[in-house]
Image (tube, rainbow, N blue to C red):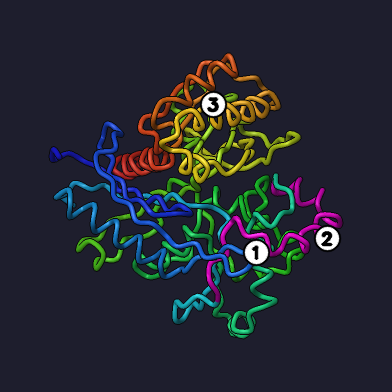
Amino acid sequence: MRRNHYVLVLDIGTTGVKALVFNQSLRAVAKTYIRLGKPSPRRGWVEQRPSEITSACRHVLRQVVAENHLRLADCLGVGITNQRETTILWDRQTGRPVYPAIVWEDHRTRAWCVGIRRQHGKFIAERTGLVVDSYFSASKIRWILDHVPTAQKLLEKGRLAFGTVDTWTLWNICEGRPHLTDDTNAARTLLYDIRARRWGSELLSIFGVPEDLLPEVRSSRSHFGVLNRDILGVKLPVLAVCGDQQSSFYAALKRFASPRAATKVTMGTGTFVAQAVGSKFARHPGFFTTLAPGPKQSLYVLESKIEGSAATVDKLLGDTPALIRYLEKLAAKINVQLKRLPVRPKKVVIDGGIIRDGLMKGILARRTGLEIEEQVPYDGTGLGTARLVFEEASARKTK
């Protein structure tokens, strides 16, 4: 690698953790990957070991630097993009989790959420842009508080902390154990008022979650801490944090002349459709409203998940006719959701591992009749966060 500036991005997914290196041209010039376990102790339960997530982050950072002989003096900083909604509670004093991470896919609180939705669903949707569902963090926090005696004891002592994967990672890899998140991750908890841009006291009361558990919320472009020296031997600033889907949306946003109605489809572990709403909160049937980085400040974005896709595609690799049949069906589902958007897009940016072989671009173009543009690299999640790190580093240099 030439001796110019670059950034490191940790992409903490559900099935694995990547470390990517982006140069100043926003080209991914190096990548390492390690898989994560995802045990399911009961039907509908999905968990992960928080310590495994932390170890994987440390490992891939060290590996990508060592294998590519990177000059750390040229590294402007680190960014984190992550699986969202996954919930971890830990002891502030010892740093030990009180329970495994409850993953976004987990359904153990589904029945409890039905009752909350009946009683408070409209109010919650108007504040969070979300429906009450086990998918999001709030009911997972409540389940741990109700079922893990250690959690209650630590809560009484003021020692209990909550975080999504970004917060947990910052706590463990940065000096001084910062307890922070960004607004894109906070917006997926059911506890963050995305209109007022703060933790909502009424929301906390509904779910029975004490505010002192929660991290401080910052914008995605912010100084989140300094990497512990023992990881890479130097102190590097963490200058961006962003939920994975919002990060890939930000990467796609750069391909549109204006944020208005910018639309992207991610086809990775899951398939997601997202479209920019703008600076004013709005809801639309069949979609969540969430926050994503914009050119200057966070934008409201409509988002929907169509289905889990990567596992199906993995099984069909090597059987091209079967793979094409599945991709045709997936394209039909994407087209249905695109038609439900408030603004019919003229162009759609696609990213994610499923687009790697180039098949999906043509299939989706024929199905939708729209201009389909592939994100390069297809790791849109890493690319969006790399942009944020470069932007924050530049802004700090000019101050």
Toward the viewer: 283 or 335?
Answer: 335
Q: Is residue 190 magenta?
A: no
* Residue holding disc 2: 115
* Residue 178 point in image, percent of width and height: 43, 66
Mark 1: few/some/many CA within 10 Å (<14, 14-19, 20+): few
- Residue 227 x, y percent position in the rendering: 31, 61
State the quadrant of the C terminus: top left
Q: Which one is earlier in the sequence, the residue at label 2 or at label 3?
A: 2
- Say which element carries label 1: loop
Residue found at x 59% / y 34%: 273
Q: Nearer the viewer, residue 22 or 143?
A: 143
Q: Which residue is mark 1?
A: 43
Residue type indicated by callout 2: Gly
| Residue to which mark 3 is pinned | 259
Over which residues does the magenta segment extend?
99-128
* Residue nearest the viewer, comparing 155 with 379: 379
In the visual, does 233 lie left or right of 257? left
Disc 2 or disc 1, which is closer to the eye?
A: 1
Q: Earlier in the sequence, mark 2 or mark 1?
A: 1
Q: Tell me the amino acid under the disc marked 1.
A: Arg
Instruction: Indicate whether 287 appears above or below 173.
Output: above
Question: CA gap, disc 2 to disc 1?
Answer: 21 Å
Disc 2 from disc 3: Cα separation: 37 Å
Circles 1, 3 touching at the beta carbon (< 8 Å): no
Question: Which residue appears at 64% of the width and 30% of the height?
Answer: 333
